[in-house]
Image (cartoon, grey):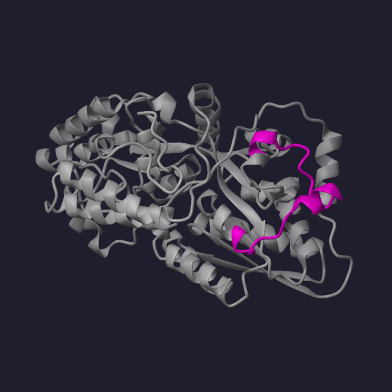
Amino acid sequence: MKKRIALLMAAAMAAASLTGCGGGATSTTADTTEGSAAAGTTEAGAGNGGGDVKLTMSWWGNQVRNEKTQAALDLYGEQNPGTVIEGQFSEWSDYWNKLATSAAGQAIPDLVQMDYSFIDQYVKNGLLVDLKPYIEDGTLDVSNISDNTMASGTVGDGIYAICAGINAPSLLYNKTLLEENGIEIKDYMTTDEFIDVCRQVYEKTGYKTNIAYYNAGAYLDYFMRGYDVVLYGDKKMGGTAEEYLPFFQMYETGIKEEWFIDPGVFAELSIGSVEQEPLVYGSGPETMSWCAFYSSNQLTAVQKAAPDGMEIGITTWPSADPKKSGYLKSGQFFSVGAHTKNPEEAVKVLNFLTNSSEANNILLGERGVPASSVIANELAPKMSDVDQEVIRYINEVVTPNCSPINPPQPDGASEVSNLLNQVQEQLCYGAYDAATAAEEFFNGANNIMNKK
């Protein structure tokens, strides 16, 4: 067990290169009644009925998420006297190191925000509580969550995570800049069309392009789906080294044509921080990007971080076949840590975050379209224009034109993503050409996976 935890900690050191989670679509137009919504709120607000209970909950995110989540937790405490929930939040780059450290010390928080990439590892290490018994006895109500969405938090015969919001890979872009310069962005851009846009933007404005620099693990997975390649096989990488060449050629082209952002820009930035994303942060075109590779639920935070007068647009990530590549995913999950002394109370908090109308009036879908169709219906008219744009994107752009998500990433995936960052860095600084990068990555990644 200690050895497995040590491996988990090692994997966490590379976790900053991973993004996203898995899941299916939840309709936001399902039938609802006032009675069912009210019942969900009442049940979700039920507490332990007395006694002092202190819980901890950890999550990664930006300031918008931090404020909303803590406010919802405070509300639970008000409705359940005797229960206090301490929020512990970090940026993505720090979160997994801290969580792995707490796991090694047998002190994983009572409630944790979980990612699709790590569910399998945390379950195998005995670090998450099986929620199935609490679903069966009614403590956790999942009646308004689709089977596909529930399946994304299932490992073996157990259910270890509940979707905190549905979203999809999303290219966020400086809509104001592009419209002012007559540059059109369409949904489902192919890689070639995307490269043409990068050229146009650079020629007309001087703004450069950041293609998920040092954070490309999720984009590679998406990109390879366009070539019918599943990134991870059984103790090996999917495809061949040659099939990875187009991914690295995209970077090589941008470097040669000078529209790819100088990697030196990132030396003093916190990669993964919305507030320091080159789309919204920088001194001018040379240090800024016209686009950023994110998930749809992050549109609100990016728009909030944007300078006055900059409107952020949203579209699909580019690939050879965006409809093959595209998928819906559970943006994040909520899980209960195995070291909790109050598992039932922790599950009640999870139920509150999932089904309480009052809690979700605070959260307002910041993590993505709510998993509960009842809550999603309730929130839609109350959301900001930006949030409603996310719902439109999920329901009208992605849902009709996407494919099933790949299986959860296996052991070794975080190490592979770390290798990808290293190879990408060598390519961007000119030490590798695209062919060398493809060979180095494919061979190195296979060596990693072969040892698992």
Q: Position of residue 217 (x, y in %)?
A: 37, 48
Main SS category, magenta section: loop
Q: Is residue 138 within the magenta segment?
A: yes
452 displayed left or right of 160: left
49 displayed left or right of 217: right
Note whether residue 259 is visible: no
Q: Position of residue 52 (x, y in %)?
A: 81, 75
The span picked out in magenta is: 124-149
* Residue in the image at 39% along x and 27% along y: 322
* Residue in the image at 79% along x and 45% along y: 141
Up-down relation of residue 425 to residue 227 (above or below): below
In front: 304, or 27? 27
Q: Position of residue 6 (x, y in %)?
A: 49, 71
Tell me the quarter of the image containing the C terminus: bottom left
Note whether residue 9 is visible: yes
Quarter of the image holding residue 260?
A: top left
Tell me the quarter of the image containing the N terminus: bottom right
Up-down relation of residue 6 to residue 31 (above or below): below
* Residue in the image at 72% along x and 27% along y: 30
